[in-house]
Image: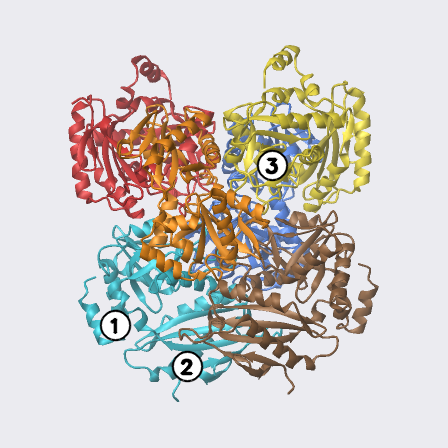
Chain colours: A yellow, B blue, C brown, D cyan, E red, F orange
Amino acid sequence: MDEPVVYLNGAFVPESQATISVFDRGFRLGDAVFDTARTFRHRPYKLREHLERLYRSLRYVRLDPGLTLEEMEAITLEVVRRNVPRLQAHDDVWIHQIVSRGPLRRGGPPTVVILTEPLPFASFARYYKQGVSLITPSVRHVPPQTVEPRAKTVSRLHLVLAELEVQQHDPDAYALLLDLEGRVTEYTSGNLFIVRDGELVTPVVRSGLAGIARATVLELAEELGIAAHEADLTPYDVYNADEAFLTSTSKCILPVARLNGVRIGTRIPGPLTRRLLETWSARVEVDIVAQALSHLPPAERAALEQEKG
Amino acid sequence: MDEPVVYLNGAFVPESQATISVFDRGFRLGDAVFDTARTFRHRPYKLREHLERLYRSLRYVRLDPGLTLEEMEAITLEVVRRNVPRLQAHDDVWIHQIVSRGPLRRGGPPTVVILTEPLPFASFARYYKQGVSLITPSVRHVPPQTVEPRAKTVSRLHLVLAELEVQQHDPDAYALLLDLEGRVTEYTSGNLFIVRDGELVTPVVRSGLAGIARATVLELAEELGIAAHEADLTPYDVYNADEAFLTSTSKCILPVARLNGVRIGTRIPGPLTRRLLETWSARVEVDIVAQALSHLPPAERAALEQEKG
Amino acid sequence: MDEPVVYLNGAFVPESQATISVFDRGFRLGDAVFDTARTFRHRPYKLREHLERLYRSLRYVRLDPGLTLEEMEAITLEVVRRNVPRLQAHDDVWIHQIVSRGPLRRGGPPTVVILTEPLPFASFARYYKQGVSLITPSVRHVPPQTVEPRAKTVSRLHLVLAELEVQQHDPDAYALLLDLEGRVTEYTSGNLFIVRDGELVTPVVRSGLAGIARATVLELAEELGIAAHEADLTPYDVYNADEAFLTSTSKCILPVARLNGVRIGTRIPGPLTRRLLETWSARVEVDIVAQALSHLPPAERAALEQEKG
Amino acid sequence: MDEPVVYLNGAFVPESQATISVFDRGFRLGDAVFDTARTFRHRPYKLREHLERLYRSLRYVRLDPGLTLEEMEAITLEVVRRNVPRLQAHDDVWIHQIVSRGPLRRGGPPTVVILTEPLPFASFARYYKQGVSLITPSVRHVPPQTVEPRAKTVSRLHLVLAELEVQQHDPDAYALLLDLEGRVTEYTSGNLFIVRDGELVTPVVRSGLAGIARATVLELAEELGIAAHEADLTPYDVYNADEAFLTSTSKCILPVARLNGVRIGTRIPGPLTRRLLETWSARVEVDIVAQALSHLPPAERAALEQEKG
Amino acid sequence: MDEPVVYLNGAFVPESQATISVFDRGFRLGDAVFDTARTFRHRPYKLREHLERLYRSLRYVRLDPGLTLEEMEAITLEVVRRNVPRLQAHDDVWIHQIVSRGPLRRGGPPTVVILTEPLPFASFARYYKQGVSLITPSVRHVPPQTVEPRAKTVSRLHLVLAELEVQQHDPDAYALLLDLEGRVTEYTSGNLFIVRDGELVTPVVRSGLAGIARATVLELAEELGIAAHEADLTPYDVYNADEAFLTSTSKCILPVARLNGVRIGTRIPGPLTRRLLETWSARVEVDIVAQALSHLPPAERAALEQEKG
Amino acid sequence: MDEPVVYLNGAFVPESQATISVFDRGFRLGDAVFDTARTFRHRPYKLREHLERLYRSLRYVRLDPGLTLEEMEAITLEVVRRNVPRLQAHDDVWIHQIVSRGPLRRGGPPTVVILTEPLPFASFARYYKQGVSLITPSVRHVPPQTVEPRAKTVSRLHLVLAELEVQQHDPDAYALLLDLEGRVTEYTSGNLFIVRDGELVTPVVRSGLAGIARATVLELAEELGIAAHEADLTPYDVYNADEAFLTSTSKCILPVARLNGVRIGTRIPGPLTRRLLETWSARVEVDIVAQALSHLPPAERAALEQEKG
């Protein structure tokens, strides 16, 4: 077999044959939820935490996937087991579960999809050295009385619109969304931390997903004796931070270089960001930065290594 | 061939084979828009207006479908032409175009789907006689700084959640959404009108789609010399209306019986609602109510005919 | 004398003669505040805390009752003393003080009413076994820039409207109000707690009364070594709670079975809820649940005892 | 008989005996609605319009008064008929209907009260000559998703608080409330109009009662060929108006002298305000200003007559 | 004399000597208002309308300039008279009045400044041919309950921040601000119009200055028989407009090419925009576009003339 | 030399010659930031903290002052050194830095002004004995999505308007601003603390400056073992506080007597307020209250000393 397999409603099928009906409510109404874990060294990381969050999303949208969490876990592990042999040593994968409410106007069973996808390290590797640029778009995050932002749903067009707006301005920038009151929430794929007076501060999880990478950083901080707390933040706080970084499943911890053109801190990564990256790397026995850089062309990698942060 | 055809990215395929990849951005990110027209007497109605609205939605989400409006129209007519022979005389169809941004992380072409679907008259026919019950859910409509509510996008989970909440309370009720300021917007599939002192009033099109059925009612009202205007409405206005009705592509004009249990007006349909329904019926040469009722079992139909509104 | 006495502006009168003028500002303008304590075993419970809260409400509305807190307390105790002999052993009473600004447009003295009322155990007893159903109505709690929600005022029509809306959907359900930002506040007569990962969480007291039963639960939790904190909660948090319960003067702690039809937790009451109920019962030397159940007809009580939560 | 009669739940009783139970939901929960008409020359004015508004308020709070509008009208006329003989020639009365949901927790019939009260001309007469001072308090009007501001309910504490705040600053000033977005709504007992470039402008009836005096002014304006329209107004518009006046049942049209200390216009009343007052006076065959002034002590009246506006 | 004169608190001084104290409240607290008119053919245009608006701003901030409107006008005309001789034929000037509350903590007289400044045609001339790019920044316009946006005050930092944010993304773009509800307001120096179905639509003047250029366009439209109305607009409306243009004192009518990268309409200027520009030019006997282009270097001008819109 | 010197763009000039151009962006656009420290016993206090805050404001508005913080500090100390000899022993000064973006439309260097100003003790001394009156104006504080309230900018007209509104009501009162959600923020020149059950509570620093005097109070509280925390406060909390006080650079700690006419606490200053004032006085070796009182005329001082708080 030369393509990854996908679990689709009870069967394991090659990726190119993993299709759903144009009548599926996920495709027609955004009526689906998902979650995304990853592997380190080809082994799933915190899969259970991700599945628990998936089941919280399912409960929020009143959707019974027809599988217990344990069954979902077992199938997920089987999908990973089947797809891992195709990977190169320095690769790792995203692990996605997507559950939709099934066919429109037909009352059928839900659609359950489980698949893996190689982590696109090349697309973000250089930001470990250069830091990423953030822009606050004019689009605002969805308020909880419309759709709970902590539920991971596929009705994500506002995030797509935020990204399109930001990339129109700078194709390399990421969108940092504000909520309707002007508070910082999250970027399109994860959370933000700032460092201020030697402490970590991250927005209150009110709008925005309670990221599992975010939780990992809070654990690491506790381990390292670094104080960390939640607060309502605005762009003013980010502009004046000593350091800032993003957290996400794929990137773990990604240094931020600027927000709306304002340079944050003086080095990339900042000292505390670097320490957290090293501690996380040690925990998973993967040099997170080195792995990402290994996916770049050698010349680009060499150039990055020479830049000073 | 014994199933309807669907246009899918350049080909006409049987409905059961019309599938999209699980990597499609419509399925994974709600990153798609659509529109829905219908036939009367098996002929498309105001197709051009629907396509113009589709192209407004596309422009809003910066999505180039790869087809001109005229090409989209020609293909749509072809889909209808192929599917109409399968219909019974008293049937009519919805005509849907759905356009997503194509595959995730692969930069491919957009996905274009055009399909027809028999109008589900049996599901709403009795409301022409009994009126439908509306409930205002606690879920609020999406604000325009998150996603423009007038763009018809598939990121519609808030509407699904509103419907689930309402149907938990009363399986036959429809959800009438309020916006974040508490103003009436629209129900999950169309617009609301009230009659007050002999005039039509409908919410300002600010949140909520500028429905084409709504526009038809405004044309009919002008034709009949009935004053009509837009205003900010709250539930108080609906409770105290002389009549109320919904407009949608499939139902044209559907009388409302109550909102949150409060009876609206004294007859179903109210006299002005009836007049609008008759005028629309004359215009399309279809008795709108009779067509819907003809899809009910004879006994149910007879019982309804005997009820007084 | 065979009816309870009521204190009314300096006199003790039989309940049926306790009337106020139709010109009273409480009746005409909602210009009055109140508080409600209760007895356990016919003895007032935390009366002083309730009176302190009453005086905070009075200060908020700039109303001088013409009595010091100590005088109000003494009269209250006298009302209780006079009315308690009429009670059966398993009864207990609510103790209400109501203070209005007195006659409209006449500048008279305030109206002070103190009365007791038998606790209506029969109306809520079964929820200790079955849990109560909550619904979030479309009506929102009053914002503090209109009227401070923590002041207990008789301008409570929004709570009545919330209750009417909810009971239209389900006559047995209670209304859990959201605020204008979509955050959970309180139910119409008290506070909400959820249990998450072995900890108690209750909405920040920002909108909603700082309930005295809520404070009691926080004391009990501290006594039992259960962590408890305030947070901004949305329905998502309640759907995904391990347990949930309401607190109020009359019900102490009432298990929640579902919110908007979504089942909360797996047992009624949940283990932590049960422990809190038992600890409170011990503290007041009343089996709270048994007392409530004793007011049900024996057959209903027996049926409830056999249900498993 | 030497006191006015009051209609109370089926009986006509002397005012001093018109009392309601301390268990009435109007007194305890603000669960009541009302309306207020008046007489001119001892004859009710636009009573039918007031009753229609009362029934809209009743429908909004789902309260059936147990009387048809026609019955309510007949009883009202009887109350007026009985009380009018006690009036002096230059007096007129307010006519109030108040309907509460009846006794708390006892499921009884609603409470219906109908009464008259002499118009307190002396309290506002001088403002016809001097203009009234308005202040915008920090308290905001109630939003429609809490309680519809157009329903006349007795849950009016926010209006009382606004008045207390304003009268703390200036005992003679009236409170002009803003809504949560900072738009001008109404003053505590009626509506505001400004004159700008020879046209009348009044806030959109969104928050605030659709006053019947306001409607009368719109009729008079049409009669006189004065353009009038609704708009969203802020204090900026009032400060810069050529004239401003209030409308209410008791005062008809009351000139405004200043808002927050800023003088409005140059004469009291302004020319257009004066014309409207005269036209209204002609319509009801009462010199509105003269009648009010006739209730002042002669010396005060003389002083006022000499002031130039 | 070889520099323009400035009127400063009673004296006419050379521009380089026109200075105010560092204790001036305008400099220290943003406690000042201003207005800006212009000349056509060296003659002031609609100066009276501008002064009336200045006096509305003054009244709003309770600032008495110590000069009547007529005196302010006379001095303004004198400043223009003195400065015009220095202009070249194709030049025109801005005319600014700035009035601050004078010295901080010293209770002195207000500061009144009147000056002219050559219109910077070279900075915007090319947009008549190419259209200008708009971007909606994440910064929101000030709400009227903070500072009335229609008052022209010097507390304009939010507009500066909006401009900085936008120019960080594209140095040539202008900032189109949204209000807190996500509605389009104005750009940093004037108003927006869109053309839709042959009609002009411009945002309701609620947030944003009631521009005098905007008023001129409305007059021209009436003259030309073009329907024009106010409405609440969002970016969706602008993306889907047939044409769009800005209005301001200096630019009169400036075609818009795109919003957030989305191309508006098909030609620059659109046919209706062109007609309005020509009619305005005729009215003031200045070819508005030609005058602006005449300030460009000949090569740039020639290149622009050859571009097709 | 008989006047204070001011540092202005590189030079030390006499105060009366310290002027800026009428084209300065600070004067014309409110495009400037500032900070304000003070001396105790003629020595700067916490100058470094003030400068760090100044640089946070500068970074927020993307303004490079052309001086490092250390250079700014050195110049500031020099300004103080030159001006101190002119002071009497019981005087102290404010130290202001103001930085604007320089000339309008000319791309010049920023304007940097550093100056001192005698503290106006006489204007507030009596409030140490009598307490100050606060009023909540109808004007709301600026939201962070318009301008960050924590950045000290000169676009402060909303604060001026709040003050004008309040002083119209009571010339001696200070304005306590609410934010758009009705939460207490700050007064026009500093922060608010309340004392409740022996603990200090101060509004969350979300809207409003993170005052350095506020930070000092938090340090003093820690030193004294007094619990202190941040919370969302509304007027209800202030009315019901045991004590309340303001903090600011000039006043350190100023007792509050009432809010909107409601008396706060029973003594001025309250016991905890007094203890904090004494501890601060000890820390700076200045009797803060005595110093302020020493600037009053002896008779007024004597009268105040005799009042009991």
> Which residue is denoted by mark 3 in the rendering?
A201
* In this rendering, the label closer to the viewer, 3 or 1: 3
Residue D219 point in image, percent of width and height: 31, 61
Residues at circles 3 and 1 in contact by the CB criterion of under 8 Å: no
Above or below, comparing residue B17 to residue C281 in the picture: above
Type of amino acid under label 2: Glu
Chain assignment, label 1: D
Above or below, comparing residue E241 to residue C171 in the picture: above
Tally of numbered discs: 3
> Which residue is denoted by mark 2 in the rendering?
D78
Residues at circles 2 and 1 in contact by the CB criterion of under 8 Å: no
Residue B308 visible in the shown view: yes
Residue D293 is labelled as 1
Q: Nearer the viewer, residue F243 or E189?
A: F243
Type of amino acid under label 3: Val
Q: Nearer the viewer, residue F148 or C28?
A: F148
Chain assignment, label 3: A
Residue E289 point in image, percent of width and height: 29, 24
Residue E265 visible in the shown view: no
Above or below, comparing residue E99 to residue D97 in the picture: above
Q: CA distance from mark 3 to mark 1?
A: 67 Å
Q: Residue furthest right?
A: C306
Residue D196 point in image, percent of width and height: 28, 51
